[in-house]
C-alpha cells in the first residue's frame, strides 16, 4: 500500500497511548476501529482446507537451473497472470540475514510505545504510526501498527529521523535485508522478462535503473478478540511494481481476492510471498495482474510482516512496454503517465478510496 509520494497527500496518524492500551487488550473496541459493515461487504472467505485454494508455489532454485528453468518460468508466468501472487521457495536469501531482520523487527514492535514513537511519523509517509488513512472510511483506523522506511536509492534514506536504533541490530539488519531483496528481485524480474518475451535489459532497467525506489513497510497486527469487527489492512492493490512479503511468524492473516472470494494465504516455512503491483500490471499491458488483498487480524496470535516494494517505470513513465505493443499491432490497455503524476495520482486516489490504475485503463 505504501508509496513514496502518498504521505504528502494522505495523512498517517501517530499511535496514541490509548491505542497501544487497546492493542494490548482488545476486550472493548472503540468506534473508530469498528468496521463491521466493511468486513461484511468485502465478501466471503474460502475454506482454507481446500487444496485447490492454495496459492501457486514458485521455486527460485528451479528458475536458475538451466534444465528446469523453462518449465518453472512458465509456472511463474501463469502465477503472475492468474493470481498475481505466489509463494517463493528456495529464494536464496541468506538465512542469517532473514533471521536478523525477523528478530530486529519483532523486537522493535515489542518495545514500549514511547520507544517506538522516537521514530514516529512527522507528517510525511515515513516513520512509525498507523497506515495511510483515507478512502471510504476516513475516520476509521486499521488494527495495525506500521513502520515505513525508504531504503533505496540510498540517498532517500532518512536514518536520523526514522531508522530505529533500538534494537541495536535494526539498522544493519534492514540495510542487509534491503540489498538481499533487491538482488533476489533482479533474478525474479529477469525470469519475468523471459516469460513475457521482452528484453531483460529493459525490464531490469525499469525496476533497478538509477534512482529507482525501494521502500519497506513493517507491520504489527496485534491479536483481536473481535476480529470480525476490525480491519488489519483494508482491501487494496499495491501501487508500486513488485512486492516481496516476509512473514515473521506463522500467524495467518493475509487474504487474496480471486473470482470475488477471499483466499487465505497459509505461509510456507521459509517462503516469501510475492505479488504483482499496479506498475507491473501497466508495464505488461495487463498481462500480469495486480490483485486485491487484505489482512484480517488473528484472534489469538500477533502477526508481524515485512513488505518490500519496488517501483518500476521506463524513461520516467509508467506505460505498457513498447515491445508488448508490437509497434502498435496490439492495442494498449493503459495510457502512459509520467512517474510524478503517477505518484500524485495514486496518493490522491488512496485518499478517495479509488484506484489510480482504473483511471489509466483505456478499455474501462
Ligand atoms: O502484512 C501483510 O500481510 C500484507 C501487507 C500489505 O499488503 C501491504 O503492506 O501492502
Ligand atoms: Fe499490499
Image: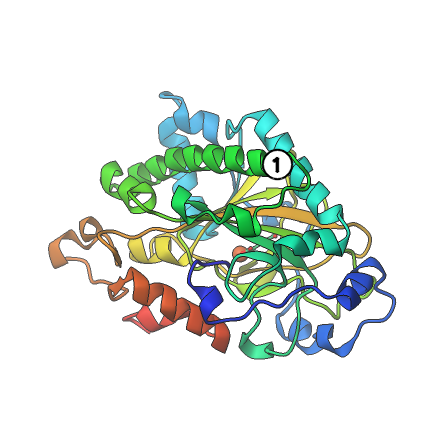
Disc 1 target residue: 101
Res 288 visible: yes
Question: Could you tell me which residue is drawn at 25 percent across and 41 percent down?
Answer: 197
Q: Picture coordinates of residue 178 (x, y %)? A: 49, 38
Q: Picture coordinates of residue 328 (x, y %)? A: 13, 59
Residue extending furthest left? 327
The answer as to whether callout 1 falls within 8 Å of ligand 1 is: no
28 relative position to 96: left or right: right
Question: Could you tell me which residue is drawn at 23 percent across and 52 percent down?
Answer: 321
Res 153 visible: no
Total numbered circles: 1
Q: Picture coordinates of residue 160 (x, y %)? A: 54, 48
Q: Picture coordinates of residue 227 (x, y %)? A: 76, 64
The answer to which image quadrant residue 47 occupies is bottom right
**Helix or strand or loop: what does disc 1 sit on?**
helix
User: In the image, is residue 243 above or below residue 40?
Assistant: above
Residue extending furthest front? 160
Question: Could you tell me which residue is drawn at 35 percent across and 30 percent down?
Answer: 70
Nearest the viewer among 257 and 186 is 186
Quadrant into which the C terminus falls: bottom left
Residue extending furthest right? 27
Nearest the viewer among 306 and 258 is 306
User: In the image, is residue 258 above or below residue 165?
Assistant: below
179 relative position to 12: left or right: left
Amino acid at each position: 500500500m505504501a508509496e513514496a509520494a502518498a504521505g504528502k497527500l494522505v495523512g498517517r496518524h501517530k499511535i496514541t497511548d490509548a491505542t497501544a492500551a487497546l492493542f494490548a487488550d482488545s476486550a472493548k473496541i472503540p468506534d473508530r476501529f469498528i468496521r463491521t459493515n466493511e468486513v461484511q461487504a468485502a465478501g466471503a472467505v474460502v475454506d482454507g482446507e481446500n487444496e485447490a485454494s492454495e496459492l501457486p508455489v514458485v521455486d527460485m532454485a528451479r528458475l536458475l537451473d538451466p534444465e528446469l528453468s523453462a518449465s518453472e518460468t512458465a509456472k511463474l508466468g501463469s502465477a503472475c497472470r492468474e493470481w498475481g501472487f505466489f509463494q517463493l521457495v528456495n529464494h536464496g536469501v541468506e538465512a542469517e540475514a532473514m533471521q536478523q531482520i525477523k528478530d530486529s523487527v519483532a523486537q522493535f514492535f515489542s518495545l514500549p510505545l514511547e520507544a517506538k514513537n522516537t521514530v514516529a511519523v512527522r507528517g510525511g509517509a515515513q516513520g512509525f504510526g498507523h497506515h495511510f488513512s483515507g478512502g471510504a472510511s476516513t475516520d476509521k483506523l486499521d488494527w495495525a501498527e506500521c513502520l515505513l522506511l525508504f531504503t533505496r536509492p540510498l540517498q532517500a534514506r532518512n536514518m536520523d529521523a526514522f531508522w530505529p536504533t533500538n534494537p541495536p541490530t535494526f539498522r544493519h539488519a534492514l540495510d542487509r535485508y534491503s540489498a538481499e531483496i533487491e538482488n533476489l528481485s533482479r533474478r525474479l524480474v529477469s525470469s519475468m522478462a523471459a516469460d513475457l518475451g521482452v528484453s531483460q535489459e529493459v525490464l531490469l532497467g525499469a525496476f533497478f535503473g538509477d534512482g529507482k525506489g525501494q521502500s519497506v513497510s513493517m507491520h504489527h497486527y496485534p491479536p483481536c478478540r473481535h476480529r470480525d469487527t476490525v480491519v488489519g489492512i483494508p482491501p487494496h492493490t499495491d501501487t508500486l511494481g513488485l512486492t516481496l512479503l516476509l512473514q515473521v511468524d506463522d500467524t495467518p492473516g493475509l487474504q487474496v481476492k480471486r473470482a470475488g472470494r477471499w483466499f487465505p494465504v497459509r505461509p510456507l516455512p521459509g517462503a516469501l510471498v510475492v505479488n504483482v503491483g499496479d506498475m507491473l500490471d501497466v508495464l505488461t499491458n495487463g498481462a500480469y495482474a495486480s490483485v486485491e488483498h487484505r489482512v484480517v487480524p488473528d484472534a489469538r496470535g500477533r502477526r508481524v510482516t515485512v513488505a518490500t516494494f519496488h517501483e518500476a517505470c521506463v524513461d520516467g513513465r509508467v506505460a505498457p512496454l513498447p515491445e508488448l505493443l508490437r509497434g502498435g499491432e496490439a492495442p494498449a490497455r493503459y495510457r502512459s503517465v509520467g512517474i510524478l503524476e503517477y505518484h500524485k495520482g495514486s496518493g490522491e486516489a488512496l485518499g478517495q478510496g479509488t484506484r489510480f490504475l482504473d483511471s489509466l485503463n483505456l478499455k474501462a
